[in-house]
Image (spheres, rainbow, N blue to C red):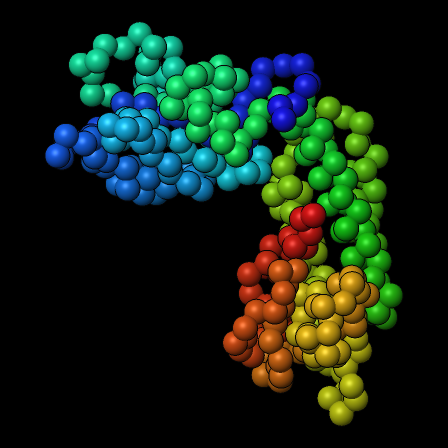
């Protein structure tokens, strides 16, 4: 069902229509001639394309394709950049509507409500599993996600603060919490709704990663004959409770005690995990934390 908010509506997931793709005739059937090469080229150029869907009818390839972009705001930005690149070369929707059949140029534009409602092969495929949304609706959804990001960060920092004694580390956690309070106090500003989650993660990347590394480093200085302190941080080696039952239960990750493994200790005895579950065949932990999401700070916080 399409959103009822006022404003111009575009197709979600964010989709670009590509027209006038080259085809060749084989046995009286129109065959795709270059879609794979085009997709690879556009991805190399940095566009966040998830899928490239050529459209077919009874005659074969229709000459149209749908490019579906990443479903977040970064994907939306990438889709508009793609659209603008064609518009600047006068190969957008208006130019396609006026183009002659003899042209060999490609044309592309963001799929809109007009395309969605057309009674043709493009409209049929757009209505199959896609929907319409508006800019205000996108902003409201991002604002909700932003508030959830701030909430999750605050909860995680409070959990960390309960398990550290070093005054320097405590002050760092307090600084992060102050940053969160400052951002929440600005929540009524219109520009907040335009902040993407990636920007939020970047803002706290250095401070949060430094805090986590310092906590891990502090554990190294502890007496190795004494069990290391546990913390409720889901970026570390998971070896405190039964692995199978933990993921089958309804217990939240925030309440699972996880043991901190010192950096470069080589003592990792179990698989790593993230919010999607166990990571099979995980090797020794390097630098005291798993590579990937933790390197971006508190990035595994999407709902």
126 or 15, nearer to the observer: 126
Q: Residue at x 50, y 17 (%)?
A: 117
Left or right: 215 with respect to 30? right
Is residue 104 depicted above or below 71 in this figure?
Answer: above
Q: Residue at x 69, y 33 (%)?
A: 141
Specify the quadrant of the image occupied by residue 42: top left
Q: Residue at x 65, y 55 (%)?
A: 300
Where's residue 113, x and y in %? 52, 17
35 or 295, nearer to the observer: 35
Q: Is residue 127 visible?
A: yes
Q: Residue furthest top?
A: 98
Q: Residue furthest bottom?
A: 225
Where's residue 152, x and y in %? 77, 51
Specify the quadrant of the image occupied by residue 104: top left
Is residue 289 depicted above or below 148 in this figure?
Answer: below
Q: Is residue 219 visible?
A: no
């Amino acid at each position: 069902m399409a959103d009822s908010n006022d404003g111009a509506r575009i197709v979600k997931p964010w989709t670009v229509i590509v027209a006038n793709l080259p085809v060749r005739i084989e046995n009286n059937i129109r065959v795709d001639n270059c879609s794979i090469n085009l997709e690879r080229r556009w991805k190399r150029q940095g566009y966040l394309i998830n899928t490239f869907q050529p459209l077919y009818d009874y005659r074969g390839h229709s000459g149209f394709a749908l490019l579906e972009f990443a479903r977040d705001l970064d994907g939306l930005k990438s889709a508009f950049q793609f659209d603008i690149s064609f518009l600047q070369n006068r190969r957008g929707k208006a130019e396609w509507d006026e183009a002659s059949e003899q042209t060999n140029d490609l044309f592309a534009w963001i799929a809109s409500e007009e395309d969605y409602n057309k009674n043709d092969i493009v409209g049929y495929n757009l209505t199959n599993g896609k929907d319409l949304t508006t800019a205000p609706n996108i902003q409201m959804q991002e604002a909700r996600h932003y508030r959830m990001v701030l909430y999750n960060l605050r909860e995680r920092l409070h959990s960390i603060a309960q398990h550290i004694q070093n005054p320097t580390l405590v002050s760092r956690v307090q600084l992060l919490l102050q940053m969160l309070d400052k951002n929440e106090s600005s929540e009524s500003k219109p520009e907040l709704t335009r902040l993407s989650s990636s920007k939020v993660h970047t803002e706290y990347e250095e401070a949060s990663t430094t805090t986590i590394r310092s906590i891990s480093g502090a554990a190294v200085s502890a007496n190795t004959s004494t069990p290391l302190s546990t913390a409720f941080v889901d970026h570390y080696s998971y070896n405190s409770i039964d692995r199978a039952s933990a993921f089958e239960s309804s217990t939240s990750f925030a309440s699972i005690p996880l043991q901190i493994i010192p950096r470069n200790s080589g003592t990792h005895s179990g698989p790593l995990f993230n919010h999607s579950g166990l990571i099979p065949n995980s090797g020794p932990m390097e630098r005291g934390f798993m590579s990937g999401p933790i390197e971006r700070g508190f990035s595994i916080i999407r709902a």
